[in-house]
Image: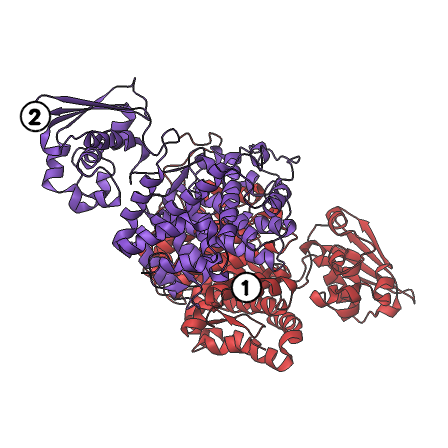
Chain colours: A red, B purple
Amino acid sequence: MARNTQVPADHNAPAITRILGEFVAQHPSRGWSDAVDHEAHRTFLNWLGCAVGAAKHEAADAAVAAVSELQPAPQATIAGRSERVDMASAALVNGITSHTFDFDDTHLKTIIHPAGPVASALLALAEHKGMGGREVTDALVLGIDVACRLGNLVYPEHYDRGWHITGTTGMLGAAAGCARLLKLDAQQTQMALGIAASQPIGLREQFGTMTKPFHPGAAARAGLMSALLAAKGFTASPRALEAPRGWAQVVSTKCAWNEATDELGQRFEISFNSYKPFACGIVIHPSIDACTQLRAQGVKPEQVERIELKVHSLVLELTGKKEPADGLQGKFSVYHGCAAGLVFGRATEHEYADEIVNRPDMVALRRKVVATVDDRIDEASADVTAVLADGRRVHVFVEHAIGSLQRPMSDADLEAKFSGLSEPVLGAARTRQLIEACWGLGRAADLRALAALCRP
Amino acid sequence: MARNTQVPADHNAPAITRILGEFVAQHPSRGWSDAVDHEAHRTFLNWLGCAVGAAKHEAADAAVAAVSELQPAPQATIAGRSERVDMASAALVNGITSHTFDFDDTHLKTIIHPAGPVASALLALAEHKGMGGREVTDALVLGIDVACRLGNLVYPEHYDRGWHITGTTGMLGAAAGCARLLKLDAQQTQMALGIAASQPIGLREQFGTMTKPFHPGAAARAGLMSALLAAKGFTASPRALEAPRGWAQVVSTKCAWNEATDELGQRFEISFNSYKPFACGIVIHPSIDACTQLRAQGVKPEQVERIELKVHSLVLELTGKKEPADGLQGKFSVYHGCAAGLVFGRATEHEYADEIVNRPDMVALRRKVVATVDDRIDEASADVTAVLADGRRVHVFVEHAIGSLQRPMSDADLEAKFSGLSEPVLGAARTRQLIEACWGLGRAADLRALAALCRP
C-alpha cells in the first residue's frame, strides 16, 4: 500500500534499536563522571518530592480508586500514601502524581520531563524486587539517556505535530531502565525497547486536564511491562524504533538518527536536566527570582511603594493577568509571582493556593507592581527595581533565573523545595529522613527502606 | 510553535467526542435489528474460539508469566487457562491470544480486528462485576461501532502511515464498551474516550512478532482502564478526538469527520464484520474453498491425477511457495492450501502444523497442483478443476470465498471453527457447553458462568 507521500520512508536508517539495546545492557555500572552520578541523585530527589507533594490531589484520588479496582496484592508503594498496590499500578500512579503540579524536571532541549516515566517505573520494580540503590541509579541514568536521546531525534517536529513528548519517549526510557534493573541481556533489552515502541502515550490536546500527568504515568507502566514481557521471552521487531513503519518515522517527520548515537556512553542527557524552583510557567521565573533577591537584600513588603518591572513582551503576553481570582489564575500572573517572591521568598505550590492569592496583603502588593515591556531584555531575564517609601531604589537584574542551566538550583535549594512539597504530607522528621535516603540512593542496600519512608 | 505545515490543522471539526459519548451512554439497549444482535453473538463466539485456541501459544506463556509478576488477586479468567488474574491483565492476555493466530474477525473496510480489543475488555470487566449478558452484548455492539467508525474516519492514510489500526482505534472501542458496561453517563463516557485517545497502540513494523497481537491486548487493557479512571472522576480533554492536537489529526492526514456520525444509531459497523474460515492470508481463501467443494462433491485425494488452478497473478506472487518447509511457510503456499482443502475439507491452525505440511501424502498431493495465472479472474475468485485418474474432470468456480461479506460463514461453519480451536484445549464436552453459552450470551444472567466454562 502506498505510504503517505509527504513523508518519504527511510530504508537506510542505522540499527539504533540494537545499538541502544547493547548500550543499555553492557555499559559498565557508574561508567560516567561524579557530576553525572550526582545529577542522578538530584533528579531522584526532585522527582520524589513532586510525587509526594501531589499525593492527595484529586487526580491521585481518582487514579488510586481506579487501580484499587484491580484488587492487587501489595507490591509497591504509592509515594505519600499508605496504600500499596501492584508495581505496574504504582508506576502509573507515581508517574501521575510526579507530574501533577507541573513541577518536575525538564530536559530543556526537548521539554521532556524524564523522571516521571523512568523513576516511577524503577522505584516500583526495585521495591518489589528488593533491589539495591546502585542498580537503580545506573538504570535511572541510562533510562533517561535513552528517552532524551530519542527525544532529540524527533524534536521539535514530533512535538509540533501534537504529541506530548514526555509520554511518547518516556515509555522507551522506562523500558530501558527496567531492562537494566532486571539485568536483561542486549537482545532482550532490544526487545523491551521494541515492545515499548508500540505504545507512545500522550496528546498535547490533553494539557489542562488530568490526562496530561497520566501520560508519564502510563509511560512508566508501559515501560515496566515491556521489560517484564521481554524478560519472559516476548518478542518485538528488532528495528521497531528506526524501520520505515517503526516508532520514529511514524510519529515524526524529523528523524535525526545521529542523536541516538553521538557520543553514546560519553555524553549523558541527564546532565542537561533542569528543575523548576517555582510552580509556574518558566517565563515568570526571572521576575520571581528578582523579587526573592530583593527580599534577601532586606526589602520588606510594607516598605514598598512600587515595584518597577521591565520584561520581554512575551512575559506579559503569557502571564499578564493583573487580578487573578484563584491559584490557577495566579500561575498566569507575573504580578502575583512578584508579590510571592517578595513576601515568601519562594513560589511553590503553597504560594499558589487560592487563599494566598486572595490574601489582602498579597492583593495590595501585586497592585504595586508596574510592568513595562522592553524587548531589549531577553525572555530569560528580568529587570526589577523596588521603590521604597523612604525614596530609596533597590535594583536587581536577573540575567538567568535560578533553575536555568546557567544558574542551577543548589542542593540546598532542592532540599528546600522537597521539604515544601513533602512536609505537609509526611511531616518534617520523616521528610528529613527521606531527603537523606535520596542522597544516599547509590549506597542503599535495598530500596524497600526508602519506599517505606514514603508511606505516611 | 509552528505546526508541521504539511498537515494543516482543522479548527472547525465537529464535537464528535461529545456526540459519541452521548450516543454510547444513551442509545437504548438492543436498539438495532435482530440481525445486528445475532452478529454480536457470532462476533463473540468467533473471538472466544480464537482466544481459547491460542491459550497455550508461547506468546501466551510469556504474557502470563509477565502479568503473574504483578501477583494480583484473581478477578478474571484467561480463556483456556486455569490462572485467574486481575481484570486489566485478563483483558491484555485475552486480547493477545485472540489475535495470535491472525484468525480473528475483520472489519473489511478498515482491516480492523475489532473483537480483540473490545470483547477482551468486556469479558474481564463483566466477569469481575458479575454483569449480565444483555449488558455485555450491548456494550460489544457499541464498542465495535465506535472503533470501526473512527477507523473509517482515518483509514487508509492512518494505516498507510504505519499504524496498526486495530490497536490505535481499539482502545477507543474498549473504552466505549466498558463505559457502557459501567453505566457511565455521557459526560463520563466522553472522558473515557478522551483518556483512551492518548493511548494509540501499534506499529505495523511489529508484524511477524508477538507484539502484533500485543496491540489488541494492550488496547483492551487501555480502554478498560480509561473507563475505570473516568468512572472515578479522572478528566481528559472533551475534544480529545477531534481537536487540532487531538487523536485524529495527530495520527492521520485523513480526517473524514462524517464517518463518526453518519447514520449513527442506524448503521452499525458490526454488520460489516467478517470471519476467516482459513488460518492464512485472505488471498488463498478462494482456492482452498474450491478444493473443499471438490471434496464435498466426492473427489478423493487418491483419485486425483492433477489439480488445475487458475488464479489472479497476485495469488502466486504472495503465496506461490511450492515446497513449504514448515507450517509458517505453508501459510504462504496456495499448493498446500489446496491439498488441505481436499484432504481435510478445512485449513485451520491444525492443518498448518509442521507435521501436516510435511506429511508424505500432503507433499505428494500439493505437487499435483498446477497453478496458472489468469488476470481475467478476480483476486477474490478461483477456478479449479480436478482431473481424476479415470479421466473425469470436476470443475468448481468460486466467485467469492466462504468468509467474504458476499458468502459469510454460516453459524455451523463458525461452530466448526470454534470446535477446531477449542477442543484441543478444553475438550469436546466443555467446548459444546461453551458454544451454547456463547449463543445464549444475550440471555446470560451473569457472565461468571460463561467465564468459568473457559477454564480447563
Residue situated in front as seen by the camera: B188 or A210? B188
User: Which quarter of the rendering shows the C terminus of chain B?
Assistant: bottom left
Name which residue type carries label 2.
Ala
Amino acid on which the number 1 mark rests in the picture: Val
Q: Residue furthest left?
A: B390
Residue with the mark numbered 1: A93
Residue situated furthest right in the rendering: A390
Task: From the top left corner, tell me how far across and down residue B305 is, in percent.
Answer: 10, 27
Q: Is residue B454 above or below residue B3?
A: below
Parent chain of label 2? B
Residue placed at 43% from the left, 39% from the top?
Answer: B112
| Residue at x-position 59% and y-position 78% | A456
Q: Position of residue A355 (x, y in %)?
A: 79, 66
**Numbered circle sitting on residue B92:** none
Residue A339, position as x, y percentages in the image: 80, 63
Left or right of A131, for residue A326? right
Q: Where does the image place residue B199, in percent across and percent down from the top left?
A: 51, 49
Q: Say what secondary structure mark 1 lies in.
A: helix
Tell me where residue B77 sits by quadrant: bottom left
Residue where numbered disc 2 is placed: B389
Q: CA distance from mark 2 to mark 1?
A: 71 Å
